[in-house]
Amino acid sequence: MAYLELCKLTKRYQKDITAVDQLDLQINKGEFLVLLGPSGCGKTTIMRMIAGLEEVTDGDILLEGKSIKELSPKDRGVSMIFQSYAVWPHMTVYDNVAYALKLRKMSKADIKERVMKAAKLSSIVEYLERYPSQLSGGQRQRVAVARAMAIEPILFLMDEPLSNLDAKLRVAMRTDLKEVHQKLGSTTIFVTHDQSEALSLADRIVVMNMGVMEQIGTPNDIYHDCETMFVANFIGSPPTNFIDVNITKETDGLYATNEMFKFKVSESLHQGIVNYVDKKVVLGVRPENFCIKEHDERKEHNEGSFKLTIDNLEPQGSHTVIISHLLGKQIKLVSSEHFNLNIKDEIDISIGDKYFFFDKDTERRIR
Ligand SMILES: Nc1ncnc2c1ncn2[C@@H]1O[C@H](COP(=O)(O)OP(=O)(O)OP(=O)(O)O)[C@@H](O)[C@H]1O
Ligand SMILES: [Mg+2]
């Protein structure tokens, strides 16, 4: 049995705003689940419904098989860290962390034990006597984490808890959060619209789009095995390139063709793509999956290779992003080889063995 289960969970704000649309989701005990999606796709709304801060329009929320939909927030055992975390400025760090425990009328000794444990886990022990104004943004953020942790929630909800931090601190904090999760083993739902945060933290990622789940899977599934064009575009930086091709049938197999190139479709893809003979489909190629041949005029062009002109170069240290155009559309390639490239050079490209086909109408992967 799943630990937390969302069953056809729906939220309509007004008649015409469906923020979350019939979401089915099962979360395992101890899992670190990340909700990922663009602004306005319903992430915060899902979290607020689980926490009991937002009424559910339709559907149900089950915790260990029992509906919690009618329970008040404090009876759910859920702890939420908000997008705009607020630590109380007039209280010391200690009192901030202890606050919810005092409300629960725990004994002083028990409170101290809980506060110290949470403070240790979030590395704020030396700041317990300070006020939030005497802390850096990252330290304040850790106070918010400690405060949520002290309640020892059965479910941890974190809504973009790192969004106020600078890039370097964000990366450091996410490592800390992962460690805390490993130590506590608490079931966690973490919201972000930052894909690298999602990929690095999650056991599983849920990609949301306009209130609907596009795909759920491990970080590797989501990146290497995209179900839809939305996911292929949203995950990966630079995103997947989409190129229109025709599928044709020849005596020796199926080909993907357009005005620039023609290549033989791998047999492993025949089953789905055979239904698209003489039709247009969308070829998706990740920037790192093109084969870039060294800039060498003496080489024979293999079947399926074509020339691209380099419009721009973005060196990133470990790799270089090559910006070019193909059939009137910009495309981006990534090369980690450091051969000498210059703007306006022509390079020989072929489609490697990693690519996807998508249906033009449904935008779903053809398998
Ligand atoms: N109280 C409200 N009344 C009406 N519409 C709302 C309300 N709260 C949110 N919405 C709408 O519901 C949709 C989902 O909002 P939500 O805050 O869940 O998005 P989000 O994924 O958390 O976005 P972000 O990444 O910007 O935080 C949006 O279209 C938003 O405008
Ligand atoms: Mg939000």
Image (cartoon, rainbow, N blue to C red):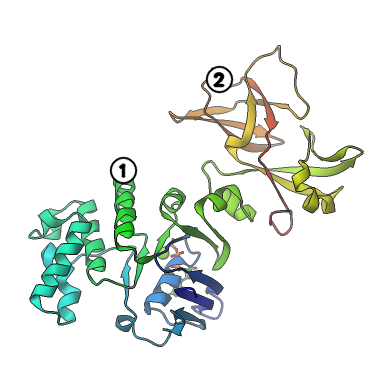
The quarter of the rendering in which ligand 1 is drawn is bottom left
Q: Is residue 9 above or below residue 202?
A: below
Q: Is residue 91 visible?
A: no
How many neighbours does mark 1 have within 10 angstroms: few (below 14), some (14-19), or many (20 or more)? few
Label 2: element kind: loop
Q: Which residue is mark 1?
A: 168
Residue at image location 46% in from the left, 68% down from the top: 28
Name, please, the residue furthest toward the bottom.
Answer: 70
On the image, the x and y values in percent for residue 106 come to 14, 80
Residue 252: name its quadrant. top right
Residue sticking out furthest to the top: 298
Instruction: Kindly identify which residue carries mark 2.
Output: 341
Q: Is residue 152 above or below residue 54?
A: above
Q: Secondary structure at mark 1?
A: helix
Q: Residue at x 50, y 52 (%)?
A: 219
Left or right, residue 101 beside residue 31: left
> Relative to residue 365, is residue 212 drawn left or right?
left
Q: Is residue 353 above or below residue 196?
A: above
Q: CA distance from mark 2 to mark 1?
A: 30 Å
Q: What amino acid type is highlighted by mark number 1?
A: Lys
Q: Say what amino acid the circle numbered 2 marks.
A: Leu
